[in-house]
Amino acid sequence: MNSAGVGRALNCIGCVYYQMGDFTSALSYLEQAMVAQKMALGTSEEAESSLLNFALTQANIGYAKLKCGNTEAVAMLEDSLLVLESVLGDDNVTAANVRSAIAFAKQPISQEAQAS
């Protein structure tokens, strides 16, 4: 199995852990997936597909970090969104979901700033 295939498999395993509510294990598998997918970016004949898979894994990491209350979630989601919008378009439902997650993640930050 090539790096892209390993990355997709690890991403799927991470998503299963996410659905089970085990966000620590999900992050572990998703981060391994991102490393494998990053290695595949330069070697894949299907560059757009590899880039999209990488962005989707970034979004999954962002979602898991968001569930863990990790402040890096927003940056990960924003990086993913740039690629998703450029590959899939602004109107794509996946891009819209990531935009919603970013807005949700930024909401507590905005409320805390107003309270100060």
Image (tube, rainbow, N blue to C red):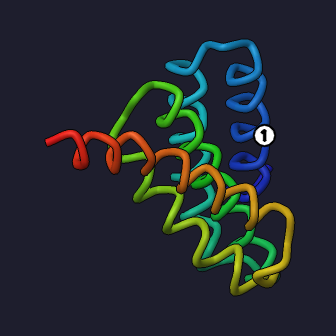
Compare residues 83 and 92 and report the one nearer the observer. 92
Q: Is residue 49 left or right of residue 110?
A: right
Q: Which residue is rendered at x = 56% and y = 19% of the image?
A: 25
Q: Which residue is rendered at x = 47% and y = 56% of the image?
A: 76
Crowd tier of the residue under label 1, counting other residues whose Cα lies within 10 Å: few below 14, some 14–19, many 20 or above: some
Against 17, residue 105 (above or below) is: below
For badge 1, the amino acid type reads Ala
Q: Which residue is rendered at x = 70% and y = 37% of the image?
A: 10
Report how many numbered discs are placed on residues in the image.
Answer: 1
Location of residue 41 (image quadrant): bottom right
Q: Which residue is mark 1?
A: 9
Q: Is residue 79 left or right of residue 15?
A: left
Compare residues 48 and 63 and report the one nearer the observer. 63
Callout 1: helix, strand or loop? Answer: helix
Against 95, residue 107 (above or below) is: above
Compare residues 103 and 12 and report the one nearer the observer. 103
Q: Is residue 58 left or right of residue 48?
A: left
x, y percent for residue 106? 43, 51
